[in-house]
Amino acid sequence: MSATLKHQLIVAISSRALFDFEEENRLFEAGDASAYMRLQLERLDVPAPPGVAFSLVKKLLAFNQPGHKRVEVVILSRNDPVSGMRVFRSAAASGIALERGVFTQGRDPFRYLRPLGAHLFLSANEADVRQALKLGFPAARVLTESARARDNHPHEVRIAFDGDAVLFSDEAERVYQAQGLAAFQSHEQDKAKRPLPDGPFKPLLAALHRLQTAGARAGCPMGLRTALVTARSAPAHERAIRTLMAWDIAVDEAMFLGGLPKGEFLREFEPDFFFDDQTGHTDNAARHVPAGHVAAGVANGEPHGSPMPAAAHAPARTAGAEAAPPSPPERSRRAPAAAGPRPHSRSAL
Ligand SMILES: [Mg+2]
């Protein structure tokens, strides 16, 4: 019988998101791929330090209990297979049960999200994240400089989400950007009882909700705590709350910050990860907590709104990347400036 990942929460993650390979990566960025591989090989028995998403991954995997496999984490990396050996060894040394990995040696890795059926893709490579989002997968570029998660809540995964253009579509964000705050508030008040369309991370929130429910039913010692952390303020709060009610998914905490910097509030919530579509917010958050940028919606130059969610099982679409030249492993490629307006030119939601 062949193996299956059905009914599990599947996280695809690059090696640089899981481990701190910044020192090694600097060699690569300097243009010396062979020196990079050599260094990884030399350090094969030196466990890599934890990366930005380490705490998130380790805690999610703790939902796996004897006889109950609920979470699968797969390394999806531009690294070469030799460097991949160090990733697996580092995982084993850290008590992270990794079994599967795809190492593309510079080629585009995101096409493998579909056969994996990933519910989340985390990578330090912005171009890969953008492609994953276009394909309909919840994806974020980890800020490798982020503060690491604290370990005050070892039995609780804590995840914080922005609302507009992350959990929700960017419909309201578009009104805000085009017409300003007063028009946005009145638009949201008028439509308070109409749920916002799904955003790129709705499928992840739904998958986490299923994990939480299954874990609790089976008496799993791991818990999950979620927070909505949004720059919305009253009266625009109501539509956000009603949207979650319509989804039948409750978040544990909701913060309507009305434009206050999110970082210090996140520091108190102590998430293992925070997702936002605005680089202004992720930069601020990364000073305090692990953060990832979701390059979706109008603030990131998306012309037609956020991608359709839940594409993990959608029919194949051409990624347009087959002919792309090989790219270096895990290299941070910033999107071209022509991709759209500056991410936080006048956006705050
Ligand atoms: Mg937003």
Image: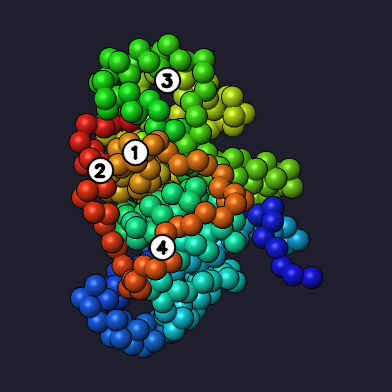
Mark nearer the N terminus (2 vs 1): 1
Residue at the spot of label 4: 321
Mark nearer the N terminus (3 vs 1): 3
Q: At numbered mark 3, what does the secondary structure look like: helix, strand or loop?
A: helix
Q: Is residue 106 left or right of residue 61?
A: left
- Is disc 2 surrounded by few (<14), some (14 to 19) or many (20+) residues within 10 Å? some
Residue at the spot of label 3: 237
Residue at the spot of label 2: 340
Residue 316 location (% of width, % of height): 56, 55
| Image vertical order of residue 163 relative to residue 215, above or below | above
Closest to the observer: 294 or 111?
111
Residue occupying image coordinates x 25% and y 21%: 180
Dividing the picture into quadrants, the one containing residue 321 is: bottom left
Name which residue type carries label 1.
Answer: Pro
Task: Determine which of the numbered discs, if any, sits on residue 303 in the image.
Answer: 1
- Classify mark 2 as within 8 Å of ligand 1 or not, answering yes or no: no
Name which residue type carries label 4.
Answer: Ala
Closest to the observer: 167 or 183?
183
Residue extending farthest right: 1
Residue occupying image coordinates x 49% and y 62%: 111
Mark nearer the N terminus (4 vs 2): 4
Mark nearer the N terminus (4 vs 1): 1
